[in-house]
């Protein structure tokens, strides 16, 4: 019979989060971008990712494009579905983070309750809240995907900023006013906060 102590001989060789952070020479976090549709979450998130990659940091962007079409393709926009959407995103982010990867999330995540839940899953100490702040009129005039027009015409219900609320973060780690800053300026401001946190310090 096999030695009982030797049933899982590889387990003690499996790397944990600190080991993986060491391997990647970075501290992992979840950077959570919240704001109205069209405020610039995706644009700024991608810019931040590019700047981090240039400096050798490994990142993963999560946004509607890779989440709503995949793992969450069975969810809509009712309050319960929005909550479940964010809960799964938070869990997925945690997996990336525990793998040492810096996760950049671009989701409207409109209420304090929903963001608080996400923070609870990820852990307060791991969560960097970024408020992508642009006035509704600006977001509406950008209307990247034509969604505001549809919402105004009543073709989309529960659209954040039109007939569903957006609650601004009370105390975000970073606030980026994208109607006043260029994409590059926003990314620069975000990096100033993020880089000292993720920089690997082998002490
Ligand atoms: P969200 O992900 O928040 O819905 P997007 O990033 O998809 O927003 O869309 C924002 C739109 O606004 C993009 O078309 C972007 O090019 C444009 N835009 C114009 N000026 C800025 C700026 N200063 N910062 C961010 N986005 C801007």
Image (tube, helix red, strand yellow):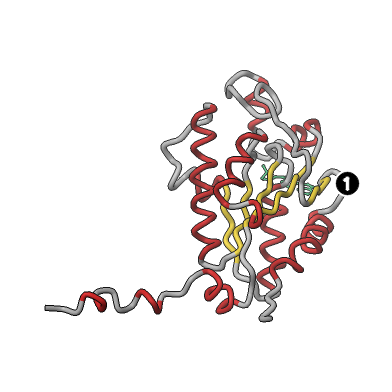
Q: Is residue 98 left or right of residue 36?
A: left
**Residue 81, image x and y in percent?**
49, 32
Q: Is residue 171 left or right of residue 203?
A: right
**Viewer-proximal residue among 168 and 68:** 168
**Viewer-proximal residue among 73 and 153:** 73
- Tell me the residue at 52%/26% (across/down): 78
Q: Is residue 37 left or right of residue 185?
A: left
Q: What element does badge 1 sit on?
A: loop
Q: Residue furthest left?
A: 1
Say which quadrant the N terminus sits in: bottom left
Q: Is residue 7 left or right of residue 88?
A: left
Q: Residue furthest right?
A: 180
For label 1, being within 8 Å of ligand 1 is answered: yes
- Badge 1 is on which residue? 180
**Residue 113, image x and y in percent?**
63, 34
- Tell me the residue at 62%/43% (across/down): 107
Say which quadrant the C terminus sits in: bottom right
The crowding category of the residue bearing disc 1, from other C-alpha atoms within 10 Å (few below 14, some 14 to 19, many at least 20), is few
The quadrant in which residue 36 appears is top right
């Amino acid at each position: 019979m096999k030695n009982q102590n030797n049933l899982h001989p590889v387990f003690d060789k499996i790397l944990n989060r600190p080991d993986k952070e060491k391997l990647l020479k970075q501290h992992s976090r979840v950077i959570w971008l919240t704001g109205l549709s069209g405020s610039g979450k995706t644009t700024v998130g991608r810019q931040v990712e590019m700047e981090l990659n240039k400096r050798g940091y490994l990142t993963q962007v999560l946004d509607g494009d890779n989440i709503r079409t995949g793992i969450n393709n069975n969810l809509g926009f009712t309050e319960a579905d929005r909550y479940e959407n964010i809960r799964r995103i938070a869990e997925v982010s945690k997996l990336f983070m525990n793998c040492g990867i810096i996760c950049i999330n671009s989701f409207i995540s409109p209420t304090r309750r929903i963001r608080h839940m996400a923070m609870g899953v990820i852990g307060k100490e791991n969560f960097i809240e970024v408020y992508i702040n642009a006035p509704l009129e600006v977001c509406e005039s950008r209307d990247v995907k034509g969604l505001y027009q549809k919402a105004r015409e009543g073709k989309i219900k529960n659209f954040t900023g039109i007939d569903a609320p957006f609650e601004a973060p009370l105390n975000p780690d970073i606030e980026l006013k994208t109607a006043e800053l260029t994409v590059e300026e926003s990314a620069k401001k975000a990096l100033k906060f993020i880089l000292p946190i993720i920089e690997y310090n082998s002490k």
